[in-house]
Image: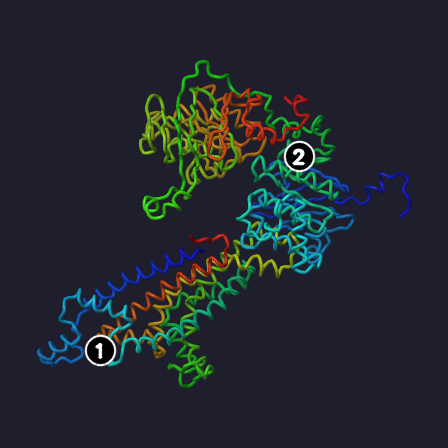
Amino acid sequence: MTRGYLIRRLLAIFLVLAIVTFAVFAITTVLPGNAAIMILGEYATPDAVAALERQLNLDQPWYMQYFNWVAGILRGDLGMSLRLSLPVSQVVGEAFLNSALLGATALVAVTVIAIPLGALAALKRGTAVDLAIGLFSYLGTALPEFVTATLLLVFLAAPNSGIFPAGGFVAPWGNIGGFAYHVALPAFTLGLILLAHISRQVRSEMAEVLSSDYIRAARLKGLTERRVIRRHALPNSLAPAVAVISLDIGYLLGGIIVVEEIFAWPGLGRLLMYALENRDLPVIQAVTLLLAGVYALSNLISDIVIAMLDPRVRYA
Amino acid sequence: MTPSLNPAVTETTKPALAIRNYSLSYRTANGIVAALKNIDLTIGKGQTVGLVGESGSGKSSMAWSIMRYLPPNAVEDGGAIRLAGEEILDYTPRQMADIRGRRMAMVFQDPSTSLNPTIRLGEQIGEVLMRHRGLTKVEAMQEAEAALARTGITRPKEMLQRYPHEASGGEKQRVVIATAFACEPELIIFDEPTTALDILTARQILDLFNQLREETNVSALYISHDLGLVSRVVDEVSVLHKGGIVESGRVDDVFRRPKADYTRQLIGAVPNPDRWIGIDAPANPDPLISLETIGVHYNAPTMLQKIFQPKEAEKAGFWGAKNVSMEVRKGELLGVVGESGSGKSTIAKVLAGLQDFDGKLQFDGKTFGSRKDIDRAYRRRVQLVFQHPDASLNPRQTIGTIIGRPLKLYGIVPADKVATRVAELLEMVRLPADYARRHPHQLSGGEKQRVAIARAFAAEPDLVICDEVTAALDVSVQAAVAELLVKLQKETGTACVFITHDLNLIRQLAHRIAVMHHGALVDFFDGPDARADDRDPYTKALLDAVPVHADMEAFDVA
């Protein structure tokens, strides 16, 4: 992988984000409802509405609004939240951190569980173990987040069982136990749906690798089974799984909105819901842009990881 | 041990490998299928024994049995396999893992698939030494370097650091061979070690094999379908047919005085360049198609790249064919020979109108300046037969539909006569007419290729291009397919471009031969002049590399 390649990829990401800013802006502009009226309430006088519109620059033509917004982003100024009277960057930054904690926990957990599960299923192909793993992971995929979440809440967080909290957030800094306690159910809900994606991908790839000539050659060199699996088979089975994980990040970004709402997790999802309900345009725009950026960046990272796993992959 | 009266007996009591009355079968959906029947095979110390057979003869099963690496549905029906006197049939998987790579090793057919693509070559050699000789990583790398040097790799240290895709086919096979020899095993099984390699590389690997065999005195089982090749490397040979050994003995005896009918048939099928089977050269050499300075640039740089990255653009892509000019005459058989990547298939694709090209193509007075000019009439008159009939016949269609397709497409015969014509065509390629109702999977490889040929001739073309049509077939079937083509040529007067890497075969068929190398036409000559002094050095090298059994010309096999 060359430096030129990386630079080109990053430039491409900026281009994508530029297109996203336009799309986001267009969508928020055509949203029904007038932001000034939403803020001032139904009975506001036309004069007050006009004054607020002027203050919010809503009276300017759309291209000026867009220009001002993009110029602000480039300066690092995302504007003020209309409803919270706080800088957007502060509101969104905090929520992003919380969401990232939840998403990363789910992703790491599912990766750590799904890869060995998939490898095990491939090694025990056609046996009861394989079948059980397949059944479990497909069940996870078949259940939408709101069903899983509801079931978890009923059985593990209902007042009479109360093993886990029904919602809320504890920051991990200094209280990792409390964080784990609160993150368990939402992370499980998010991860379950991705379990099958990743474990099935690893299984099919691993099965193919195990039947390849070079695995046969490795066994016929007399290598231990342990080395055949860990050194020869597993690394070659992971590259497609990494590609799937990066696609799953997109899925995760959607799932997180539902899950945060159910478990009262103060992240981007909740913030976005709140902003949408209250026509808090600057927040909607910033959150959407951020989600697009995360997705684009995760794709780049996965390509880099794949290149590290497989020396044949060369980007130039 | 008590002294034996006969010293020879003492010598042979503990051969490197002894297989006695060994049988093997597989459980399949269609019941038990016998793969090996009552095999007896002995490899003395330092001896090389060839195991020759066609695909499906059971020769690979034999290798897996010896290595004790059988699929779960394999059933062993008794017998004995002894490695230096030890019965390895009774060994546990753990005991076998200890023996594999240390006391017996294997060299595989295709080095590009038998090496792990994501592990450096050094580690792939060194891991055997670490496993079986308990070396540290550093020691193993030093040993690996020495092992590579013995296989004639010029810069072994550098090679250790490379990944498989950074080495050539010949280099990779040397790595596999170095790995096999690394722990100085008693027995090495060579499973078609040169089949996947180019002619010149195969020759080098064969020489290397002979050299290492002398240096190490290893015992070897050399598995191959290629009789000519086997005769050059082995002391004794066993011929395997349908799971049973039909003949075995010293290689010269088996070749000169074959006892079994099957052996005789196999030897007869080996292409002998001095036995002409083609038709007479056309009396008046009128040109049919001529190629003028044809060039094919794969992955050519785009216009944008030429503007913005002129330096990279110059290096982009490669020339599949460059400045190739030749003509095909009416009714002749033109052989095109070259190694993989030489551009011979590129030329086939250009001729068939499947590939964009620079330059000019003239056909029957018409000039075609690019692929887009090529019209339907041209496509009817120039037909292509592909290497793999499995891939070129639609598995969902019946043979009748497949052969009937060009008949309907070009309106060769009226719709109500299609079935009759299909039957005639099947007869022409010596297949029963009721095959029209079958599907490709119900036919053997050779039969499928006959169907593909029948389809090409159905369009009543002026030229049939045969792209390695015999390469995927067994030796005995190859000869039959080649003879079939000649028969069809005689009957129809169609010209034929026969693309192959098999020099012995092409010299039996072709009126003229074109030799391609790195996309360029390096030599072009009349068939009988193949051995002339003014041949291009590359042609000479190719001819010298082809295994022809030294005594093959001496015995009359017909």
Residue A172: x and y, percent? 43, 80
Q: Quadrant of residue A256?
A: bottom left
Q: In the rendered view, would you say B375 is above or below B183?
A: above
Residue B129 appears at what percent x and percent y? 68, 55
Work out how far the residue at label 2 is from the one at label 1, CA to CA, in angstroms: 85 Å
Q: Which residue is mark 2?
A: B230
Q: Callout 1: helix, strand or loop? A: loop
**Which residue appears at 17% of the width and 66% of the height?**
A64
> Does mark 1 fall on the same chain as mark 2?
no
Q: Name the kind of residue labelled 1 in the image.
A: Leu
Give the residue at mark 1.
A82
Picture coordinates of residue B275 (x, y %)?
A: 59, 21
Question: Given the image, on which type of amino acid does mark 2 rest?
Answer: Val
Residue B370 appears in the figure:
yes
Q: Is residue B54 left or right of residue B378?
A: right
Q: Which mark is residue B370?
A: none
Residue at the spot 72% in from the left edge and 49% down from the top edge:
B184
Q: Say if mark 2 contacts mark 1, CB within 8 Å.
A: no
Callout in the foreground (2, 1): 1
Task: Depth check: give the residue in front, B321 or B190.
Answer: B321
Identified at 75% across, 43% down, the residue is: B217
Q: Residues within 10 Å of mark 1 (few under 14, many from 20)?
A: many
As rendered, which of B59 and B194 lies closer to the eye?
A: B194
Q: Chain of mark 2?
A: B
